Amino acid sequence: MLDKNTVIATRLFVVSIAMFGFGYALVPLYDVLCDVTGINGKSGDISLAEAVKLDVNNNRTVTVEFDTNVNNNMPWSFRVENSKLQVHPGEINEAVFIASNQTNQTMTGQAIPSVAPGVASLYFKKIECFCFTQQTLGPGESKRMPVKFVVKPEMPENIRMLTLSYTFFPVSSPAKPEPSHIVPSS
């Protein structure tokens, strides 16, 4: 027969392992929950072949606004050519974003997208996006980056406007950027 201390220690060990397992599984579970419900504004992607098969609703217009941000540790400028587009659900659209490295060193960044309102992310699908891969820019280099997307015709009628927001984060950062070598933005 086991003494009380051994039983308590065993139970605590089992609870600790269960808590670790739950914590480890939390991120994938959260991603699945976001994909299913549209929480957190994560949008999905769609192939061009699938997108061209969608029925275009020419009787409806949805406003897509674009928002650009850079993390405080990212010395880049980042903007969109047109801050707003009027689109018909089912039609393939393109927005062009421009990123510029403001340092004298090569840097790599990753753009993280978000769609608001969150429920709209279930219907906003990207065909091509610079956010799918990391972007590397040389010193003072600028890059035009297209986003091809479609708003699915099934999007509820009460959603007349959605916002696609990107924030660039550094993947690698310059050793020590010197202010005297910062390239002015264009």
Image (spheres, grey):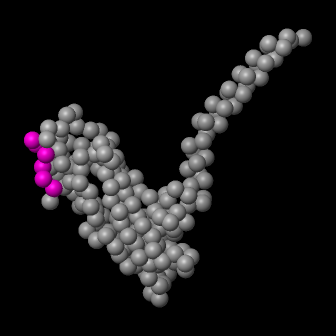
Residue 181: in magenta span:
yes
Name the image quarter holding the C terminus: bottom left
Viewer-nearest residue: 108 or 83: 83
The residue most toward the right is 1
Q: Is residue 75 left or right of residue 16?
A: left
Residue shown at the point (19%, 34%) measured from the top left:
176
- On the image, the x and y values in percent for residue 40 come to 52, 56
Viewer-nearest residue: 142 or 128: 142
- On the image, the x and y values in percent for residue 130 come to 33, 57
Q: Is residue 28 above or below residue 160?
A: above
Name the image quarter holding the N terminus: top right
- On the image, the x and y values in percent for residue 38 come to 56, 61
Residue shown at the point (63%, 31%) measured from the top left:
20
Q: Quadrant of residue 85?
A: bottom left
Q: Is residue 142 above or below residue 2?
A: below
Exactly how many numbered labels are in the figure? 0
Residue 163 can be seen, yes or no: yes
The residue most toward the bottom is 59
Residue 90 can be seen, yes or no: no
Residue 156: in magenta span:
no
Q: Quadrant of residue 172?
A: top left
Magenta span: helix, strand or loop, mainly? loop
The residue most toward the left is 180
Q: Is residue 179 above or below residue 101?
A: above
Residue shown at the point (18%, 48%) measured from the top left:
102
Residue shown at the point (23%, 54%) measured from the top left:
77
Q: Which range of residues does the magenta coloring cover?
A: 180-185
- On the image, the x and y values in percent for residue 7 come to 81, 17
